[in-house]
Image (cartoon, helix red, strand yellow):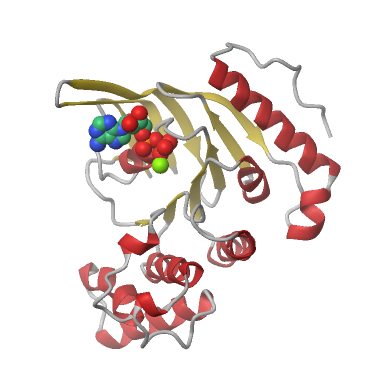
Amino acid sequence: MLDVRGLNKVYEGSGRRVEAVRDLTFSVAAGELVCLVGPSGCGKTTLLKCVGGLLRPTAGEVVLAGRRVDGPPDGMAFVFQEYGRSLFPWMRVGENVELPLKQKKGLSRARRGELVADALASVGLADAAGAYPWQLSGGMQQRVAIARALAYEPEVLLMDEPFAAVDAQTRADLEDLVRRLWRERSMTILFVTHDIDEAVYLGERVVVLSASPTVVREQLKVDLPDGRDQVHTRVAPRFAELRTHVYEQIQAAKRGTERPVKSGLPRQ
Ligand code: ADP
Ligand code: MG
């Protein structure tokens, strides 16, 4: 579905040269939920912007369903970290969610209304269409941003540390919301986070990134049961093994050690 091949990104300007991403290669299958985890500043946002066609790679390419990405592709939607800046404060919630639909060809006004109502209901905000974003809590605003992406009916959803700025309880609810929506809507999701527990809890697979200049350090299948829940999954011995393993990988990556300190992950 999605192939990232030899992706490299160098930022140049103002006398500075930053090689944010050195060489990234990985694939995401249709309908998969993949988490990318790596330390702050390792180029996660840079990578997602390249995948979403918002930024041109210096070298390498992103291929979506067989076509090279060279601008925002039709079937992709983005949820950014900063919900506060991603919603328009002068538009009501319903209008914010509807806005990208106006770019889509052939959607009647009535159909747009249905999609907006359905997306808001999906994130538990059926009653909020008439409110302004600033009248809502941070967690609710991020739900609106998710609804806006859902209404667009994307095949691929890109999420860039979407829950980094909300409180722990809200974050747990939103994580479960993502898992539920992923199952209900059979989307492909690429979810970026610096939070190891979040990556293991959410993902079917975790791609561990090194520190910048970034390469893929490891790809790990998350062999936890499908029906995850915040109470039981997080205390499962396998969850602890997986998170510890990823943690060691990231620590080793920060120190620049080539191979992980401890041996591989025990088999289940
Ligand atoms: P992450 O999302 O993992 O925290 P980013 O992709 O935001 O990392 O940044 C990776 C590196 O690229 C950092 O060193 C950052 O300073 C640099 N960087 C990001 N955006 C720009 C830019 N527009 N110009 C120059 N350097 C940038
Ligand atoms: Mg970032």
Quadrant observed for ligand 2 in the rendered image: top left
Q: Residue at x 55, y 44 (%)?
A: 34
**Seen in the image, is 103 located left or right of residue 219?**
left
Q: Quadrant of residue 14?
A: top left
Residue 131's place in the image compared with 148, above or below, is below
At horizontal 78% and vertical 53% (from top left) the residue drawn is 233
Looking at the image, which is closer to me, 186 or 214? 214
6 is higher (above) or lower (below) than 65: above
Q: Is residue 44 visible?
A: no
Residue 227, image quadrant: bottom right
Instruction: Tell which of 217 and 62 is nearer to you.
Output: 217
Residue 229 in the image: above or below residue 201: below
Residue 204 in which image quadrant? top right
| Residue 85 percent coordinates (x, y) | 31, 61
User: Does 5 appear above or below 137?
Assistant: above
- x%, y% of residue 101? 28, 72
Quarter holding the N terminus is: top left
Q: Position of residue 134 (x, y in %)?
A: 36, 75
Q: Residue at x 39, y 64 (%)?
A: 149
